């Protein structure tokens, strides 16, 4: 439905315009009338018409002034003006305020219809464009958490080269010319230790969302849940000196810790890496944050890597030892995070092997994109996810065949296949014989 407002101090003119338009567009147009400029402004503010046909010469607030005021309320309106030749100079002024058409009095019926038809087409086209833009934005908003998560994992694993990170940054609204990592761990104490693993994971998700919103008051960031921690990569200005960055990051960490304590009743340990220029170097800040988090973590709740670096410099006179100490921590953190994540994935597959486990559903469960999930799984296991699932299903099928309590068709359904013939082909491909032959050879 198109909303159309006609403003004219002459009731006969309003009625004529209304009758002509409604005769052609009765089902498409909702019509509103105003007898002066002030009333036009009030009606517009209330109903937000799509099209406004405005007479120039009206008592009180004239048409031009009314257009100026309405333009302050909304710029997304299609203005048409009615004018006599005597007032054409006023009409030219109106062109500065988004007026698209003018109609000379006395107006021609066909001209009015043509111009209103054109206005309706433009309004509907804009609506369709806005609808498509909203649909695109909704889709983008749906994938933003995945992009956020995947980008963070790519930084942690120093694998930005395998994703189109510039496109990710664009969608996430980030530049990351400069930033640092803040790694957060929920302490296994207080009212956290009694929770089961599923409840702990849910709590970590809530804490991550809370912290992300808290950080967003001052900074842009991306984040992900690692198997044991919550990683945040925080974007900062590149014109601050190292000392100021250190002070600001520690202060932020302490405020986050206090806010989470008040909100969730749990305590955090926080490790902070140094700031780095260029997002491709941020993996080093993550390694430093990991070192900071695990360096005498029982003594200090928020620790910066710069403090650790200074401490290790004093404690170890041999610079080579200091380098080895830092390097081993970096390598261990990366290996531990990736292998722990893989362990969670394998555990999930082993429990749910008999269900529909598509690449998309698995990736979604672990907040990863299908591409990243597939690549990481292959890299860590040497096989792709579908082969892994197939091998588990066939192993389970062999166990059931050995038990002898179920027939082949029942086993087929039990291990996650819907087609016994397909199950037999897969079984033979892996074992070199059909399920029937395997059973008879027992």
Image (tube, helix red, strand yellow):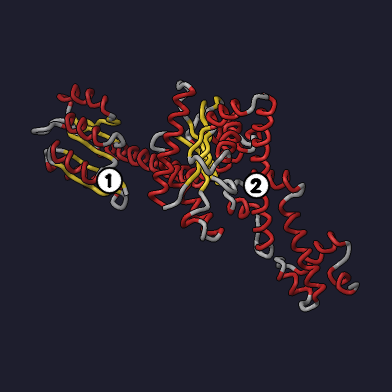
- The residue furthest bottom is 405
Q: How many marks?
A: 2
How far across and how far down the image is residue 66, in percent? 18, 33
Q: Which secondary structure, mark 1?
A: strand
Q: Residue at x 81, y 68 (%)?
A: 398
Q: Quadrant of residue 252?
A: top left
Q: Is residue 414 left or right of residue 257?
A: right
* Label 2 vs 1, first from the N-terminus: 1
Q: Is disc 2 in contact with disc 1, using a CB cutoff of under 8 Å?
A: no
- Can residue 310 be seen in this snapshot? yes
Residue 248, percent from left and from top: 43, 30
Residue count near mark 2 (Cα–Cα under 10 Å), binned few <14, some 14–19, many ≥20: many
The residue wearing badge 1 is 3
**Disc assigned to residue 373:** 2
Q: Quadrant of the C terminus?
A: bottom right
Q: Relative to 238, is 390 on the left or the right? A: right
Direction from residue 323 to residue 219 in the image, left or right:
left
Q: Nearer the viewer, mark 2 or mark 1?
A: 2
**439 or 134: nearer the eye?**
439
Which class describes the residues within 10 Å of circle 1: few (<14), some (14-19), or many (20+)? some
What secondary structure is marked by label 2? helix
Q: Position of residue 210 (x, y in %)?
A: 43, 46
Whole-percent x and y of residue 111? Answer: 28, 36
Is residue 144 in sight in this rendering? no
Q: Is residue 46 left or right of residue 257?
A: left
| Distance (Cα) linking label 2 and label 1 | 50 Å
């Amino acid at each position: 439905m198109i909303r159309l407002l006609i403003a004219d101090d002459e009731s006969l003119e309003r009625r004529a315009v209304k009758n002509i338009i409604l005769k052609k567009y009765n089902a498409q147009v909702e019509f509103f009338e105003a007898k002066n400029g002030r009333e036009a402004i009030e009606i517009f503010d209330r109903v937000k018409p799509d099209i406004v046909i405005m007479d120039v010469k009206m008592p009180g607030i004239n048409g031009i002034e009314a257009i100026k005021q309405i333009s302050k309320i909304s710029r997304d309106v299609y203005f048409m003006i009615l004018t006599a030749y005597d007032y054409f100079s006023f009409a030219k002024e109106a062109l500065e305020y988004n007026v698209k058409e003018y109609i000379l009095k006395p107006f021609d019926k066909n001209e009015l219809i043509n111009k209103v038809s054109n206005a309706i087409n433009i309004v509907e086209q804009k609506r369709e464009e806005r609808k498509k833009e909203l649909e695109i934005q909704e889709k983008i908003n749906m994938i933003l958490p995945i992009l956020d998560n995947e980008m963070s994992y790519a930084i942690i694993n120093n694998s930005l080269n395998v994703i189109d990170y510039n496109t990710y940054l664009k969608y996430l609204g980030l530049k990351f010319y400069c930033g640092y990592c803040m790694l957060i761990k929920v302490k296994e104490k207080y009212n956290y230790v009694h929770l089961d693993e599923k409840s702990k994971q849910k709590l970590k998700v809530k804490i991550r969302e809370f912290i992300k919103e808290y950080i967003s008051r001052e900074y842009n960031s991306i984040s992900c849940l690692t198997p044991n921690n919550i990683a945040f990569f925080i974007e900062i200005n590149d014109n601050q000196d190292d000392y100021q960055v250190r002070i600001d990051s520690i202060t932020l960490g302490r405020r986050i810790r206090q806010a989470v304590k008040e909100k969730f009743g749990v305590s955090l340990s926080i490790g902070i890496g140094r700031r780095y220029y260029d997002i491709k170097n941020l993996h080093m800040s993550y390694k430093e944050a990991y070192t900071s988090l695990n360096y005498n973590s029982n003594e200090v709740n928020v620790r910066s890597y710069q403090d650790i670096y200074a401490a290790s410099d004093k404690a170890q006179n041999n610079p080579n030892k200091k380098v080895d100490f830092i390097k081993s921590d970096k390598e261990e953190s990366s290996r531990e995070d990736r292998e722990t994540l893989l362990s969670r994935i394998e555990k999930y597959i082993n429990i749910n092997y008999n269900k529909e486990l598509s690449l998309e559903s698995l990736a979604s469960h672990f907040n990863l994109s299908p591409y990243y999930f597939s690549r990481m799984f292959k890299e860590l296991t040497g096989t792709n996810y579908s082969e892994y699932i197939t091998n588990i299903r066939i192993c389970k099928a062999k166990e059931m065949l050995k038990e002898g309590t179920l027939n082949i068709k029942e086993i087929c359904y039990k291990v996650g296949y819907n087609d016994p013939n397909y199950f037999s082909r897969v079984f033979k491909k892996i074992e070199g014989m059909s399920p029937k032959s395997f059973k008879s050879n027992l």
